[in-house]
Structures are given as structure tokens and as C-alpha cells.
Image: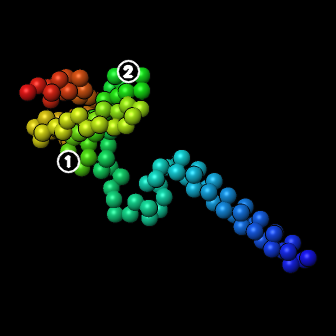
């Protein structure tokens, strides 16, 4: 009888420990993102993927200009997923890949219009 109670208490303690650890990990991810977990993104630069600009097109749909390493991608997002719309050439991506001077911002609509001219 005492052995069964001890076994049940041990299992209950194990479940409590697992729940506390799950709560701690999810709160850590919520505060710092996945890159905040030590060792999880080891050897990877958190700045390899960066959303440079985004424009809402309609409810639930957006255009995103994303930098991935040294490439700029124009993505369309909707409830159904993400689609690659265009990959900017080096000349088109150059204004986005270099740091803008202090106090200036690039006009996304103007650069988007320039990059879609063929």
C-alpha cells in the first residue's frame, strides 16, 4: 500500500516538474525568441534573415521585402502561406543591403516600383 502511494506521488512529482519546465521554456521563447535559447541556434547568425519592409495589401495579405544573407526576396503572404514573388538582382538589392545614412529611410514603394520595371 505504501509502495503504491509512493509510486503515485513520484509520478505526480515528475509530471509537475515537466509542466514547470514546459512553462519556463515557453516563457523564455516568448520573451527572447528561439535564438534566446542557449545552444539551439549555435553557429547561426540571428541576423541572417531579416524583414526589411512590409506593406499590407489587404486583410491578412502582405508584401514583405526580406533579406536572406546577401539576397533580397519579395514575398507575398496570405492565410494560405508564403509565396516568392521575385528575387531582386544585385543592383536592385544594393540599396537594401547597405546601411542607410543616419536620419534617412528608403522609400519602399519607390524601390519596389524601380525593381519591378523590366
Residue 97, can we see it?
yes
103 relative to 46, above or below: above
Q: Position of residue 26 (x, y in %)?
A: 57, 52
Q: Residue 32, image x and y in percent?
A: 49, 49
Looking at the picture, tell me which residue is in the foreground, 112 or 2.
2
Q: Position of residue 73 (x, y in %)?
A: 23, 39
| Quadrant of the snapshot with the N terminus | bottom right
Report how far apart the C-alphas of labels 2 and 1 lie in the structure: 29 Å
Q: Which SS class for mark 1?
A: loop
- Residue 105: which numbered mark, if any? none
Disc 1: which residue: 70
Give the residue displayed 78% in from the left and 71% down from the top.
10
> If the image is split into quadrants, where does the C terminus sit?
top left
How far from the left and from the top, in percent, is residue 106?
23, 28
Please tell me whether mark 2 sits on a helix, a strand or a loop.
Answer: strand
Who's the residue at 12% across and 39% down the image?
A: 89
Q: Residue at x 71, y 67 (%)?
A: 14
- The residue drawn where x is 33% and y is 56% is 45
Which mark sits nearer the N-terminus, 2 or 1?
A: 2
Residue 96 appears anywhere in the view: no
Q: Residue furthest left?
A: 118
**Splitting the image into 4 quarters, where does residue 11 fall?**
bottom right
Instruction: Read off the residue under disc 2.
Output: 58
The one of 14 and 66 positioned closer to us in this rendering: 14
In this rendering, would 64 be left or right of 7?
left
User: Would you place residue 53 above or below residue 49 in this image?
Assistant: above
Residue 61 falls left or right of residue 31: left
Above-or-below relation of 105 to 33: above
Please name which of the two marks, 2 or 1, marks the residue nearer to the observer. Answer: 2
Amino acid at each position: 500500500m505504501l509502495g503504491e502511494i509512493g509510486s503515485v506521488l513520484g509520478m505526480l512529482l515528475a509530471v509537475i516538474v515537466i509542466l514547470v519546465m514546459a512553462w519556463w521554456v515557453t516563457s523564455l521563447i516568448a520573451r527572447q525568441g528561439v535564438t534566446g535559447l542557449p545552444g539551439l541556434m549555435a553557429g547561426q547568425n540571428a541576423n541572417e534573415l531579416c524583414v526589411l519592409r512590409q506593406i499590407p495589401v489587404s486583410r491578412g495579405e502582405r508584401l514583405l521585402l526580406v533579406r536572406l544573407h546577401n539576397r533580397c526576396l519579395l514575398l507575398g503572404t496570405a492565410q494560405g502561406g508564403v509565396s516568392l514573388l521575385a528575387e531582386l538582382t544585385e543592383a536592385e538589392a544594393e540599396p537594401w543591403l547597405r546601411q542607410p545614412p543616419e536620419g534617412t529611410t528608403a522609400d519602399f514603394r519607390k524601390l519596389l516600383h524601380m525593381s519591378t520595371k523590366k
